[in-house]
Amino acid sequence: MAGTNLLTLLDDITALLDDIATMSKIATKKTAGVLGDDLALNAQQVTGVSADRELPVVWAVAKGSFLNKAILVPAALMISVWLPWLITPLLILGGLFLCFEGAEKVFARFLPHHDDIADGDETPDLVEYEKQKIKGAIRTDFILSAEIIVITLGTVAGQTLLNQSLVLCVIAIVMTIGVYGLVAAIVKLDDAGLYLVNQSKVSGSTVKEFIGKGLLAAAPRLMQFLAFAGTVAMFLVGGGILSHGIELLHHTQLNVIGYAQSILGNIGEVLAPLIFDGLLGVVAGLVIVLFHVAYTRLFKTNK
């Protein structure tokens, strides 16, 4: 009898794990786009950090990401049970913040603040600079992680609370390890290239030399691309959250997609939402930045 009960328990556990694996696979597919943005944004955050501090910075941000998810997973489960109506407003606030950060980067790039110019001759505090980088990366990760958690929660909405909890934990752990593992690999490409070049001098291998020089040439260009892609991702993700969370904008987007599809066919159907979300993110971000600048100057003037 005891043996039968044990086999039944093992069968139930196997079925549960199979369900968790299936639902996790579905959730992974649905969050793939956000994960790409998360990768680009976090790789961007380590630009400007000295080579010997790149991995410690990535590790610090990864620990912050785990902490973010340790907060977000139980919070999402509690909200889904007791305050399900709060999920969309919170996502919209996160989307607006992403748009603001993207616009602020563009604003700082083309229209540097007066304070930035005035302080340009001063020796930068590298420790404080690194801390600010880490804080900014963790803050951005929090918003993207929230979106991943909410998308995953929507995927398992009809499941039991236990299944929801297990799938959210699996997604949170696997995605964090995957994203920051890739970020660490990307930021150390130049070191790998230098190692291969040095090895080729010892062994005389032209293959190692060719690959090493290729990595050395590609690494800075890849980081520049990721810095650009990270800013674009902020607008796309932020605009996408707004267009899906606000009914009027969602209805407008559907009309734009339908019109684009009637003219360009399948290409229009694919490009229209990307362009719509990107432009929406840019407009929303610039509006918030202008309000922020006006408020800051007014506050400083009154002070």
Image (cartoon, helix red, strand yellow):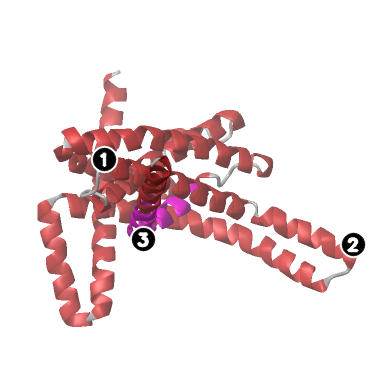
Q: How far apart are marks 3 and 1 (CA)?
A: 21 Å
Q: Nearer the viewer, mark 1 or mark 2?
A: 1
Q: Which mark is residue 161?
A: 1
Amino acid marked by disc 2: Val
Residue 25 figure quarter: bottom left
Which secondary structure, mark 2? helix
Q: Which mark is residue 29?
A: 3
The x and y percentages for residue 284 are: 24, 48
Mark 2 Cα-neighbour bin, 10 Å: few <14, some 14–19, many ≥20: few
Query: Can I make out residue 143 in this image?
Result: yes
Would you say 199 lies left or right of 301 here?
right
Q: Which residue is nearer to you in this view: 91 or 14? A: 14
The x and y percentages for residue 86 are: 17, 37
- The quarter of the picture where the C terminus appears is top left
Q: Distance between the residues labelled 2 and 3?
A: 45 Å
Q: Earlier in the sequence, mark 2 or mark 3?
A: 3
Residues in magenta, as a range: 17-42
Residue ranking furthest to the front: 1
Q: Residue 78 carries which label?
A: none
Q: Which residue is nearer to you in this view: 58 or 15? A: 15
Amino acid marked by disc 1: Leu
Q: Which of marks 3 and 1 is nearer the N terminus?
A: 3
Q: Which of marks 3 and 1 is in front?
A: 1
Q: Residue at x 40, y 51 (%)?
A: 14
Membership of 21 in magenta stretch? yes
Q: Nearer the viewer, mark 2 or mark 3?
A: 3
